[in-house]
Image (spheres, coloured by chain):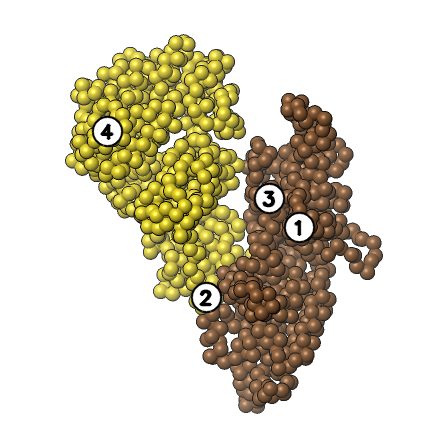
Amino acid sequence: MFKKILIANRGEIACRVIKTARKMGIATVAVYSDADRGALHVKLADEAVHIGPSPAAQSYLVIDRIMEAVRATGAEAVHPGYGFLSENRAFAAALEAAGVVFIGPPSKAIEAMGDKITSKKIAMAAGVSTVPGYMGLIADADEAVRIAGEVGYPVMIKASAGGGGKGMRIAWTEAEAREGFQSSKNEAAASFGDDRIFIEKFVTQPRHIEIQVLADSHGNCLYLHERECSIQRRNQKVIEEAPSPFLDEATRKAMGEQACALARAVGYTSAGTVEFIVDGNRNFYFLEMNTRLQVEHPVTELITGIDLVEQMIRVAHAEPLSFRQEDLKINGWAIESRLYAEDPYRNFLPSIGRLTRYRPPAEGPTATGIVRNDTGVFEGGEISMFYDPMIAKLCTWAPTRAAAIDEMRLALDTFEVEGIGHNLPFVGAVMDHPRFQAGTITTAFIAEEYPDGFQGAVLPGPLVLRVAAAAAAMNRVAEIRRTRISGTMDNHRRRVGDDWVVTLQAETFRVTVEADAEGSDVVFADGTRLRVASDWEPGRPLARLIVGGEALAIKTSKIPMGFRMRLRGADLKVLVQSERQHQLSGLMLQKAPPDTSKFLLCPMPGLVVKIAVSDGEEVQEGQPLATVEAMKMENILKAERRGVVKAVRVEAGASLKVDDVILEFE
Amino acid sequence: MADILQELETRRAAARAGGGERRVAAQHAKGKLTARERVELLLDDGSFEEFDLFVAHRAVDFGMAADRPAGDGVVTGWGTINGRMVYVFSQDFTVFGGSLSETHAQKICKIMDMAIQNGAPVIGINDSGGARIQEGVASLAGYAEVFQRNVLASGVVPQISLIMGPCAGGAVYSPAMTDFIFMVKDSSCMFVTGPDVVKTVTNEQVTAEELGGASTHTRRSSVADGAYENDVEALAETRRLFDFLPLHNRQKAPVRPFFDAPDRVEMSLDTLIPANPNQPYDMKELILKIADESDFFEIQKDFAGNIVTGFLRIEGQTVGVVANQPMVLAGCLDIDSSRKAARFVRFCDAFEVPILTLVDVPGFLPGVAQEYGGVIKHGAKLLFAYGEATVPKVTVITRKAYGGAYDVMSSKHLRGDFNYAWPTAEIAVMGAKGAVEILYRSELGDGQKIAARVKDYEARFANPFVAAERGFIDEVIMPHSTRRRVARAFASLRGKRQENPWKKHDNIPL
């Protein structure tokens, strides 16, 4: 086996590879840019080599710098992770030329599959079912519009070298095709250094289901079943699961066999993924093959018990696979939630900054399943603007899908992340969504179910009652502590009452808290009685409770006369007041929030790439006003209504914070 | 007998009705509570003991003799907040617009005298149209009697003012002399002269809210220490503040049970200071991570953000914190921040509240406006306040401590008890670049030479060890152990006794 390998990546995937290497007794070398000097993968690795400035194009994407690090450390093999150089043929070739093993497929296979147009042709030849589209390269926006018209709208405009949603746009009109072509091209150039674009038919109501394959250099090729990744936002996966709630045994087998046929056709070795679009009738079409480890590989590991990174290393070391297709059974159900530094309340715009608090749930077996968290960050670490905004991949496993969802709900509720905006509440809300629970999902799930964005989940009635009971019991404990202050009048101390009025989600409950040594019974006006047991103490940010027999975890902080409580995707203001406080609160005026509609505010920290309008210009609804780049994504800010620009306040090139004013309307 | 007892209830009910249903409804329509409702929410249930319920004015001019409501427009008495005693007055806008008469003032004076004598704070709820014009000079005399007691009570018992309606003219000077002023957004205002007079005299057009609303006084004038959305919230938060304050100047700061280990380690603090010395970070994160249960009551949050002041608890005991905030103006000291912090430090010292100082200060803000504005004397206020303070003083330098500002920020030389520094601290006369430009003026043309000099200077002075060698820093501590070190420092200082030379009073540069 190898003695030392280098991981040409960063973040959670570098950490994840290091873990398996360590388990196998292989020494590890990390590489890092300026921004990653104190990153987790650098701390975990046995050695670390600095490879350049923060922008990936000057560090993680520079083949020469990686090659230097390989030479300097004497690493025998390189694991590329995903993204960066993982599917770069030149990199694989450079390693081959230097006699260093690439832990991945042969460079020829990368080349064949790396180009979406070529890969589709090969797939067709290998008997794999494919989607209609235009296979040639497109020169300019005019040609893009013409081709889009021929293929028929809607169309998908994609960077040939793309992946992960970058350099990808869906266009429903000519105007969108024109704009999408340009921004895809720009993003592709910035992210991959390759601005070739192609167009294909966009299949509506599709599910995204992919097959994990694993091939060795001895002619064995197996499929490790499917992953369903239909919960996507802007073509970026958010929640994945294995197996798919949609496939039947026959379809699974057909897809698996076609995936293996394609792998064989290109002489594939190592782990790879063949992505399909599946329609409502279980017709499946080949999308692309990812010649690398996928972000969402942990769900496959959880249902098969196979460590994919270990298998990649063994295959790279020319070992034959030690198991056969019939050994690969589906055991239970696994779900992955991608935790992104994206603010769901601001249309998922990137949020960067310091993780002032980061406390993931404990990993390992639980009473009812397994929790796994792949992460590359730590409390006190920085989410930088230079890279992908992923914080962690939280996975749960349980014997059934419903149990895996339950496991995920509790894991999400105990996951504490503060300091930056993140999508925990959104993922929590999806877990509670009836359509997700039923498994009747498509890649349009988020767009259809959250058409106006995400404003926080609304808790269902029975849960509201439980939260109210929890708040009342917790408030009583906090109030009693307040009376234990020094300097009180002897014999005239405050007696904390048992009757409280709890208000949340615009509902009001009058409750009586009957406390005893072990906890308290919270009795509602209608006679409902909920037992609350908890070891919560005032000031603790995470309250774990059993309320009416159900386990709850609530992120809690103090607000005047109550608590801010976060759980299941909801962010609640829970007031616990005395009857008199409640009564008098009713006399307070409801104040309207300040009007910011006269300004275009920067929705995320980032760089102004372009200001598309000038002072005095009249703009139409939907007209692009400015482009702000953050996390390598170009975000076009559009006019929400007709108006006249009064003054542009910033210039292109300006670096802005959230809510900085870009321009003002009349 | 029953009739006689009933008579009391009848009279009480009449007095408690204040200005009557119509005026109470008008008060409510403005989103304001009545004087009694406010007292009810401020104090523990059933703890209020009222004085002078039946006091009525003695004025006879302008037909006043015919209208003599019991209580005379102010509710006074005492009660408890979480079991601790407090004196309260609450002006009743429904009775003569809460205007201050001779007898109204006497009621306030009575409870203030008792507060000073018995050692309990005073909370004044202000909602008054001003002087009772019908009484003329008697009313003015009443104000002055209250002012005199504000002065005598200052430094003896904490005084808190809640502005929950208008507070204009001479009336503003009573709250002005109390320790803390809190306002209610959109329904309170304070000014010496109102918009009408301003218009007449200076021809400036301004609304009452612009001239003296909560936003003006919390952000611009710094007259107020905080503002709340409405009466109910303001009263609840006043209860919260009260729990941080001692009852009087002979008592130590209060202690209450806490649920947070004094030796809690915060590894994340090791990465709080950014690699780039010019990059800001949020000092509030450090404050929250030092505090018990991350509970912090900030004073003057919206004013002079380059310094943060407020109360927290360590091992259950109140500590006042003063911290430079690198997020605003790089955390420098200037006129506003010096004034803000000086007043806070003096409050803490007056009331035996230990002071924690967190330092990251690049110096005093340069500029014509600062010098013309008298930054010399204003900066001296903070220096003076720290220098005279005899309460336990613990200081942690996280990063920059440059020049005179280093001296000011509770340095060892100002009788700091514990002066800690993080390894990232830079204690020097100035930043390396500035120092080199003065020391090596002749080499300024040679960029390379200067760069080397800067590097040398940094190596020599951009660390805490030069100061530690001289004992100006007691110990260089790991950021992650800050809470434990600070907690132990304060624990060791519980018996601290220190006295300044006898004096009638000092002469702080006001």
**Neighbours of disc 2 within 10 Å: few (<14), some (14-19), many (20+):** some
Q: Please state which amino acid type lies under the numbered disc 4.
A: Glu
Q: Residue at 57%, 32% (x, y): give it.
A: B275
Q: Nearer the viewer, residue A488 or A264?
A: A264
Do badges 2 and 4 share one subunit?
A: yes
Q: Looking at the image, how many numbered discs can be counted on the residues?
A: 4
Q: Chain of mark 2?
A: A
Quarter placement of the N terminus of chain B: bottom right
What hue represents chain B? brown
Vertical arrangement, residue A52 with respect to residue B188, above or below: above
Q: Secondary structure at mark 3?
A: helix
Q: Provide residue A142's location: percent of width, then percent of height.
A: 25, 31
The residue indicated by pointer 4 is A143
**Disc 1 from disc 4: Cα separation:** 64 Å
Q: Please state which amino acid type lies under the numbered disc 3.
A: Leu
**Disc 1 from disc 3: Cα separation:** 12 Å
The residue indicated by pointer 3 is B329
Q: Chain of mark 4?
A: A
Cβ–Cβ below 8 Å for labels 1 and 4? Answer: no
The residue indicated by pointer 1 is B335
What hue represents chain A? yellow
Is residue B283 in view? no
Asked if residue A468 lies left or right of residue A537, the reply is left
| Mark in front: 2 vs 1 | 1
| Mark in front: 1 vs 4 | 4
Q: Residue at 53%, 29% (x, y): give it.
A: A38
Do badges 2 and 1 share one subunit?
A: no
Q: Please state which amino acid type lies under the numbered disc 2.
A: Met
Vertical arrangement, residue A108 with respect to residue A470, above or below: above
Asked if residue A413 lies left or right of residue B458, the reply is left
The residue indicated by pointer 2 is A588
